[in-house]
Image (cartoon, rainbow, N blue to C red):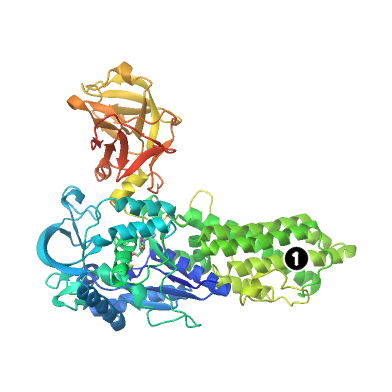
Amino acid sequence: MKNFYVTTPIYYVNDAPHIGHSYTTVLADILTRFHKLIGGQAFFLTGTDEHGQKVQQAAFKRQVDPQDHVNEYNLRFKNLWKKMNIEYDYFIRTTDEDHKKFVAECLQKLWDKGEIYAKEYEGWYSVGEERFFSEDELVEGKDPISGRPVEWIKEKNYFFKMGQYQENLIAHIEENPEWILPDFRKNEILGFLKQSLNDLCISRPKARLNWGIPLPFDSEYVTYVWFDALINYVSAVRKRTYPNGDAIWPASYHLIGKDILTTHCVYWPTMLMALEIPLPEHVLAHGWWLTGGSKMSKSSGTGIDPMTYMQDYGVDAFRYFLAREMVVGQDCTFSDDAFKRRINSDLANDLGNVLNRVHRLVLTNFNGKLPHAFKMDAPANELKALAIQVRESVLSGIVQVKLSQIIEDIMSLVRGINRYLEIKAPWKLAKDETATEELSTVLLVAAEAVRLSLCFLSPVIPTKAVEGLLMLGTSCEGKDDLTWGKFQGGELFGEGNPLFPRIEVEKEVPQKKEPKVQNKPLLAADVASAMDLRCAKIIEVNDHPDAESLYVLKVDAGEKEHRTVCSGLKKSYTASELQDRSVLLFANLKPAPLRGVLSMGMLLAGDGEDGKAVLVTPPAEAVIGSRAFFKGLSASDPRELKIKDFDKITLYVKDKIVYYDEKPLEFNDKPVSCNVSNQTAIH
Ligand code: MSP
């Protein structure tokens, strides 16, 4: 079995840990436990990112020395991981002496090899994002990510010759199609690499930022925080080995959130190429946890406090929810309702039922001693076959990090046990003196299947699985316990209480209010993901009662009621040209009154000749009401967007096709078109 080295991002110590941090760490923990359980060698690294402007500012705000600040704040993560039963193999801090030494060695090596050079540089600098932005990237003159002001800065800096690795990087990604997962993230990076790749500024003058690792070849500068941070993945393990002496690097999986894809899939591999260190095997980007459609942010302090759910419903219920609910790669909404529903149905009902039924029946009918099996009938054999099949899918699912799928497979076994019990009705057999042998077989078979389910679930719900197994008088020690046939009869059951008590859910009034999230400005890429761009048909055209240039249109967007949309198309189209025309409706734009008529959305168009608008047209195959997506961009649930959100992104036309960021807009692989010249903006 292959060795397994998994990493989480190292977390900034400027804020309290939130669900985003918890998710990646739980994911890594579960994968590591699975690998160890099936007899593999695994190493799990997490840690904290303790240098850079964000941390310096956080310390400054608290009026404490940065070192004292990080010493205190890294404990927030360590303590949380302890509470959450996270068994990492090593916790790295970028202020560790050993890490600083290795970063300095790497820099020196690159400097000696001529991979780093000094250059006078000027540009727009964002303190929040700690990087320069080009004029084009700014939105209304501000940092496009945080929306904060930028400063024009001119200074000498050191640059890593990242650009020269562009071709090698593209070749690596193309030759290893599973290097970046999921697939659409790979396409995102390949899209990014279509433009020429710039060199990377890897220094910050001490005058501006002194909380960092000094450059070994110029003491007036410290290292750019990302250059320092990414190296943690190697520095933490370079002197360590697996129990059998194998080297730990390269990583099997870097688990990351989608917002740090470029740093991990462009900066990091090119740094490794220059350092002549092998590349990691996979970078896997998960989506965001959302509440009510918005991201739980890392620095806005709006993150859900995982502790509240953990404290109220237990660590294992919380771990289970995170792992089961999010499909790795997709965004996922955390809501009070979803949490309670999931825990009640999967854990309190399905798992709780099978365990309690089997436990109680053995206690009351056999004095707590598991009986022997006699004759396996068809339903017993079916359940056994299901258990064997689930084992196979769990083993292959782990390798592919399909965690929510693995859990669903295990729960299908649990439901299979419940079905088996319903068919055999052992509670009835218990009343029939002639059926003791049949009852014995049913209980042994069901107990074995419950035992296996709990073993498979043990990486996800470690404490509760141990408790459940103790009720069955057993434990899960390793690979051998994952095969059918451990229970032979004669085992003594233990005491037991329900593992997951049912959570009371009040019908109308929710018990617990959904955590409030302030609406944070969206990032540009999120706007494109969240736009509900629909195929719609104009079914009525009227003049606006109060504005000469506007039509008031009735539009069929596949909803119960037709929408009213005001549109400034009068100069460009006659009413009959618009009647029955198929159009692209921006359907989740915040409704706005236009001269007294409420417009529910906007029709997208480009600028044609003579200043006339040219409507964007869905392909003939598009169904009314269906949504168009940008190829290669993960879509999120549509949330209401404001016009100023839309202003953050540029939709443009290339070869008559509508694009965002090199990604064509499509309905089922069929592009959306607009008959205007190249590079015309769509609005
Ligand atoms: N320090 C850098 C990582 C350096 S790795 C060499 C960093 N830290 S962070 O603390 O800001 O974020 C850590 C991770 O949390 C990122 O992967 C980010 O995607 C993730 N999340 C932040 N908010 C999130 C959600 N709402 N949902 C899921 N994950 C999110 O970036």
Q: Is residue 176 left or right of residue 472?
A: left
Work out whether residue 458 can be spotted: yes
Q: Quadrant of the C terminus?
A: top left
From the top left corner, tell me how far across and down residue 461 is, in percent: 55, 68
Task: Between residue 296 and residue 223, name the one nearer to us.
Answer: 223
Residue 147 drawn above or below residue 562: below
Q: How many marks?
A: 1
Which residue is pictured at 39% across the width and 76% down the height? 78
Task: Between residue 333 and residue 90, name the one nearer to us.
Answer: 90
Task: Say what secondary structure mark 1 lies in.
Answer: helix
| Residue 432 picture quarter | bottom right
From the top left corner, tell me how far across and down residue 213 is, in percent: 22, 76
Please tell me in which quarter of the rendered image ligand 1 is found. Answer: bottom left
Task: Between residue 562 and residue 143, name the one nearer to us.
Answer: 143
From the top left corner, tell me how far across and down residue 283 is, in percent: 40, 62
Q: Is residue 61 left or right of residue 512?
A: left
Q: Is residue 294 left or right of residue 460?
A: left
| Residue 639 picture quarter | top left
Residue, disc 1: 445
Q: Residues within 10 Å of mark 1 (few under 14, many from 20)?
A: many
Which residue is pictured at 16% across the width and 59% down the height? 125
Q: Quadrant of the N terminus?
A: bottom right
Q: In the image, what residue type sits under mark 1?
A: Val
